[in-house]
């Protein structure tokens, strides 16, 4: 059995008197694709933000990739996000006045130094080789989300977080994006945590956990029909 | 005692920084640097004391100044070599680094630097009242500052490394800063003076060699440009160029050093990360050369305000008798033979001349114009053991006052008559006029 990339025990997060995440114990093995489902307001994004180092827990312990996120300083946490995590949101958060390739290079810049050839290659991998010089406004929703994927994987993260990346996409684009993520995971072996409201999207994963009002209520291991 | 500590501030401050740089530069144990540095400093102070006790002041200064001159010259050489080599990929660096980082070489280098540093520091202590106790002041101060330096150095982030090149620049800058407040050790003023004299001599030779007798064929407009070459600006800017070039070259060498090759690393993120780290390290290494540039500027600035208190006498007006002879009695209101510089102003009609009389160390009086053949006639003041040209801030040792040439005051012939000195008024005026014409014409753009 693979080592765990994420280990939480008694992890909580409260906003004032709202307890968005009740004590959560969870192990995520390295290389797993974990789907997170639940009603709106059930604490899915809260969980993602904690795991991605975007937010700090109120209590409990949280180990990601062998690092104790509670012990990291602000700088340490920034380095962790930079080098360890790739994130895709529902809203693409691309810089509107930069081209696709420049948006990817921006992520390289914040990580280390920009490298245009590598950024181009990353866009070619997500099938946007012909749209390098287009701004986000000139791309379709599915294409924008693919730019986000290129941006998220450019720094070779060990952990890819998706917070409803396909929430705004139609069925066809959703399939395309999910297929792409699956291919990339096969090549790069990163761990995926995917928040979704869509049962079909959740089915791409190895396991689904269900959150309700900040509590892990159920978990389901999926038997892959297409992988025998 | 407090006065001495006050005087020693620039020297002790640079000592403090030198220790800091040395500790940061070598990766040997800190105790090696501390022991070598402190014992070197004590040796330096002792050396200086011995020199001044057994040799003349000018010899002693010359010894220390040569050490400084040599290190500045070495600095130039290293800077040029560094720029020349900066394009190479650093393959031999490991063997060089191994030699550099042995305890022995680190100790020797530190000790040598500390000796020079201590010697400069001790020069600031007046020879007359220097008991062993007086010398204890800089030694004790240096030891405590070295210790303070050690404590601070431990707190500086490890990522802030001092590359040998940068550290060398900083040490030379600090030594020159330390010495620049002592006019007789200062390198910057004589450097600009040499440049000025060099240009002056070259233009002069050039004019003579192409047989242009003064300004017979040369139009005034041309003089304007030639004049520029004689100005203080030429000496100053020439000096500045020589002064700052090596440290700029070193900054250039560090800045343009080839980054380590990362092409063999397959994963993009990893490759970029290594590259970014190398770039960051290179940038951090530039901090020390830039700090050195500031120190060099400080040294040049300090050198134009020598801290020796000089005596600036007001000229006494004198007249000639019927025979056209100026007679100045040796004793009376003014004692000519008291070793001080006595200035006089002689007026004849619309023309005037300034001169001074001084008793040399050889016991002979000398009469000189208050001007030299090179500088604008701003005149001279008296510093200890020397006269100081107000214009170019060069110190002329008393031994050479009365000899012609260079920045020496122009000597005037005179006769010692009984109890006074007699000077021919016409000779004096003519000599003044021709000297001053030669220097002001060119400096003011020619007429
Ligand atoms: N910054 C915040 N300040 C205060 N309350 C917050 C904050 N962020 C989230 N919450 C609250 O925490 C709870 C969980 O929010 P969270 O965003 O995790 O839900 P979610 O499961 O992602 O919902 P959705 O599916 O709508 O995105 C909600 O009640 C929300 O109002
Ligand atoms: Mg959410």
Image: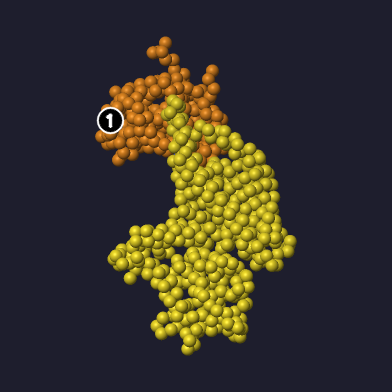
- Of residue B137 and residue B413, the one placed in the foreground of this image is B413
Q: Which shade is chain B?
A: yellow
Is residue B106 at all visible to an observer of this figure? yes
Is residue B224 at all visible to an observer of this figure? no
Q: Residue furthest right?
A: B132
- Of residue B7 and residue B408, the one placed in the foreground of this image is B408
The image quadrant that residue B228 belongs to is: bottom left
- What chain is colored orange? A
- Tell me the crowding category of disc 1: few under 14, some 14 to 19, or many 20 or more residues within 10 angstroms, Cα based: some
Left/right placement of residue A182 relative to residue B407 reads left
Q: Residue furthest bottom?
A: B322
Above/below status of B77 relative to B395 = above
Left/right placement of residue B34 relative to residue B244 reads right
Q: Residue A98, percent across and down?
A: 31, 38
What residue appears at the point 70 percent right and 64 percent down from the top-left corner?
A: B130
| Residue position for label 1 | A131
Q: Residue B71, percent across and down?
A: 56, 50
């Amino acid at each position: 059995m693979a080592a765990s990339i994420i280990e939480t025990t008694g992890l909580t997060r409260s906003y004032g008197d709202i307890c968005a995440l009740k004590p959560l114990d969870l192990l995520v093995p390295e290389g797993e694709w974990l789907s997170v489902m639940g009603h709106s307001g059930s604490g899915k994004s809260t969980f993602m933000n904690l795991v991605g180092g975007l937010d700090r827990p109120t209590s409990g312990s949280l180990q990601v990739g062998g690092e104790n996120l509670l012990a990291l300083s602000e700088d340490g946490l920034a380095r962790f996000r930079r080098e360890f995590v790739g994130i895709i949101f529902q809203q693409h958060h691309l810089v509107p006045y930069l081209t696709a390739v420049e948006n990817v290079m921006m992520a390289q810049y914040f990580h280390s130094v920009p490298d245009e050839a590598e950024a181009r290659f990353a866009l070619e991998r997500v099938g946007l080789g012909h749209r390098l010089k287009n701004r986000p406004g000139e791309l379709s929703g599915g294409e924008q989300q693919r730019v986000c994927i290129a941006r998220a994987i450019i720094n070779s993260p060990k952990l890819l977080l998706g917070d409803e990346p396909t929430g705004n996409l139609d069925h066809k684009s959703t399939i395309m994006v999910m297929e792409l993520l699956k291919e990339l995971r096969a090549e790069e072996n990163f761990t995926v945590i995917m928040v979704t409201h869509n049962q079909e999207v959740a089915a791409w994963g190895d396991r689904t956990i269900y959150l309700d009002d900040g509590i892990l209520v159920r978990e389901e291991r999926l038997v892959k029909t297409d992988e025998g | 005692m407090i006065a001495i500590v006050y005087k020693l501030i620039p020297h002790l401050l640079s000592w403090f920084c030198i220790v800091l740089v040395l500790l940061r530069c070598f990766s040997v144990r800190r105790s090696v640097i501390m022991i070598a540095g402190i014992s070197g400093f004590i040796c330096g102070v002792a050396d200086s004391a011995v020199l001044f006790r057994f040799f003349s002041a000018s010899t002693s200064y010359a010894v220390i100044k040569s050490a400084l001159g040599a290190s500045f010259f070495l600095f130039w050489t290293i800077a040029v070599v560094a720029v020349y080599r900066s394009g190479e990929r650093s393959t031999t660096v490991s063997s060089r680094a191994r030699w550099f980082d042995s305890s022995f070489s680190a100790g020797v280098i530190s000790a040598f630097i500390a000796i020079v540093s201590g010697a400069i520091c001790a020069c600031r202590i007046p020879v007359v009242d220097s008991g062993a106790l007086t010398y204890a002041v800089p030694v004790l101060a240096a030891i405590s500052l070295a210790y303070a330096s050690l404590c601070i150095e431990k707190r500086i982030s490890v990522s802030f490394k001092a590359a040998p090149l940068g550290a060398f620049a900083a040490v030379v800058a600090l030594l020159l800063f330390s010495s620049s407040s002592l006019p007789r050790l200062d390198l910057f003023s004589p450097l600009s003076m040499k440049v000025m004299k060099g240009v002056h001599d070259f233009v002069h030779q050039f004019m003579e060699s192409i047989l242009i007798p003064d300004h017979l064929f040369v139009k005034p407009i041309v003089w304007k440009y030639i004049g520029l070459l004689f100005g203080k600006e030429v000496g100053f800017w020439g000096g500045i160029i020589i002064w700052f070039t090596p440290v700029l070259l070193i900054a250039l060498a560090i800045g343009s050093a080839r980054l380590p090759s990362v092409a063999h690393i397959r994963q993009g993120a990893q490759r970029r990360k290594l590259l970014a780290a190398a770039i960051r390290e290179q940038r951090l290494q530039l901090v020390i050369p830039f700090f050195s540039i500031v120190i060099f500027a400080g040294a040049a600035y300090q050198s134009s305000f020598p801290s020796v208190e000089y005596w600036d006498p007001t000229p006494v007006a004198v007249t000639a008798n019927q025979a056209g002879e100026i007679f100045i009695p040796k004793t009376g209101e003014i004692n000519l033979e008291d070793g001080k510089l006595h200035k006089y102003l002689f007026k004849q009609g619309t023309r005037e001349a300034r001169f001074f009389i001084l008793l040399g160390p050889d016991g002979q009086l000398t009469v000189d114009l208050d001007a030299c053949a090179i500088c604008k006639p701003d005149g001279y003041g008296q510093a200890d053991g020397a006269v100081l040209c107000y214009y170019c801030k060069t110190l002329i040792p008393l031994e050479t006052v009365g000899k012609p040439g260079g920045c020496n005051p122009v000597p005037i012939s005179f006769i010692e008559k009984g109890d006074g000195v007699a000077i021919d008024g016409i000779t004096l005026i003519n000599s003044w006029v021709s000297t001053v014409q030669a220097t002001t014409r060119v400096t003011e753009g020619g007429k």
